[in-house]
Amino acid sequence: MAGHAFRGEDFFSLDDLLSDEERAVRDAARAFVSDKIIPIVEKHHRNATFPTELIPQFGEMGFLGANLHGYDCAGVNNVAYGLIMQELERGDSGVRSYCSVKGGLVMYPIFSFGSEKQKDHWLPLLAKGQKTGCFGLSEPDHGSDPAGMETKAELKGDTWTLNGAKRWITNGTIADVAVVWARTKEGIRGFLVEKGMKGYSAPPIEGKFSLRASVTSELVFEDVKLPKDAVLPKADGLKAPLMCLTQARYGIAWGAVGSMMAVLDEAVHYTKSRVQFGKPIASFQLVQEKLVEMHTMLTHAQLTCLRMGRMKDENKLKPHHVSFGKRNNVRSAREVAKLGRELLGANGICDEYQVGRHMCNMESVYTYEGTHEIHTLVLGEHLTGIAAYK
Ligand SMILES: Cc1cc2nc3c(=O)[nH]c(=O)nc-3n(C[C@H](O)[C@H](O)[C@H](O)COP(=O)(O)OP(=O)(O)OC[C@H]3O[C@@H](n4cnc5c(N)ncnc54)[C@H](O)[C@@H]3O)c2cc1C
């Protein structure tokens, strides 16, 4: 691992635009990542394991559902929430994914669409890191087009019967509760399915070369019997899971900034100390061009995030703005990681350094929560008024 203190690039002094509280939240998250995540992440990435021992600490730090209010959530504003996601992804996309799935895709739907009983029971446990959740929307045969989902729930008397399968589900195997979206007679509804229910299993997906320090699973439902009140009463139709995705994608746009900060920091440090042809490679024009490209993409993404955060706090942020942020920032993070890997030469393919891990992780982040292409189509529809999905 590059043995130097991390310096977060801030070219346009965006720190000056943050409140004292936002800076304090960011600094606490940054210190947590340096102390607790960076030292162990290489091992977890190599072994394809998630650092479950950190989950209660995420709770203590207020990282879980941080922008929700009440129910033991931290209740910070959306800029501070974004800064937490940024810092966590500076550590690793898998760690940020754990927290953003939990906050945006598990706690947010329970908070927004759940009954008081569901909220009172689950939200404090999830916020404190005493329980873990996952979000099951994607299926083996339905990814970009979740409207085609085949998972079905049928109500007879006081019991729902759930059948079907979900795939690529973050946290699935370790989740105590799964928010599962299923087709019913009245349209798509959300259900809370608990670990250990008869007919429910969540085997892990093996062999990933990306997001290795994250649990990704299949969810299988074979005649799972759910009580009538397992349904999220206020979630009606596909709009509900799409609202959840908008929350999580907002955090991803910030997370991509963290990945770029990590990669740029490592690349600048490396190129200044690596000597070839009798000089540091940072003194070569072709190397500087790559660093400048990386820096420009990072700086654009930072500006986008801060504006998105302020708009979200003013309730002005629309799904197409979030598509812009997710699409632009993740594309940039993917490019930045690739350039960083080039600059480290052979060391760039080794997990002693971070750039290769970020590069592999970005392949998942580019694909999940709406692929790059799907966000292109969202923005195309915004510009033209014409939906071009099919
Ligand atoms: C590590 C990881 C974690 C994930 N976690 C979760 C999770 O927690 N919960 C969950 O529900 N899902 C999760 N997903 C699933 C993710 O959301 C899907 O992979 C994603 O929506 C894309 O679906 P797909 O992989 O089936 O690809 P497909 O939809 O089959 O797409 C394949 C390719 O075709 C392109 N394509 C599809 N339709 C169009 C179109 N109309 N126009 C142009 N191009 C198109 C896509 O952009 C893509 O390039 C995760 C995925 C990964 C990799």
Image (tube, grey):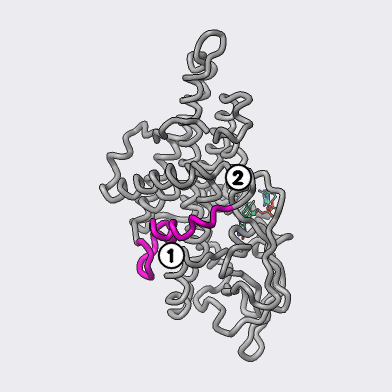
SS at mark 2 in the image: helix
Tell me which secondary structure the magenta stretch mostly adopts: loop
Name the residue nearer the viewer: 189 or 262.
262
The residue identified by callout 1 is 127
Q: Which mark is residue 50?
A: none
Name the residue type under label 1.
Answer: Ala
The percent coordinates of residue 297 (x first, y second) are 48, 33
Name the residue type under label 2.
Answer: His
Name the residue nearer the viewer: 142 or 94.
94
| Category of crowding for the residue at label 2, using alpha-carbon neighbours closer than 10 angstroms: few (below 14), some (14–19), many (at least 20) | many
Task: Give me the residue at 61% from left, 64% from top.
Answer: 136
Task: Give me the residue at 48% from left, 71% from top.
Answer: 110
The residue identified by callout 2 is 45
SS at mark 1 in the image: helix
- Which residue lies most toward the top here? 278
Rendered view: 369 above or below 276: below
Answer whether residue 65 is magenta in the image: yes
| Category of crowding for the residue at label 1, using alpha-carbon neighbours closer than 10 angstroms: few (below 14), some (14–19), many (at least 20) | many
Answer whether residue 55 is magenta in the image: yes
Q: Quadrant of residue 335?
A: top right
The span shown in magenta is: 50-74
Mark 1 or 2, closer to the camera? 2
Name the residue nearer the viewer: 62 or 335.
62
Q: Is residue 190 visible?
A: yes
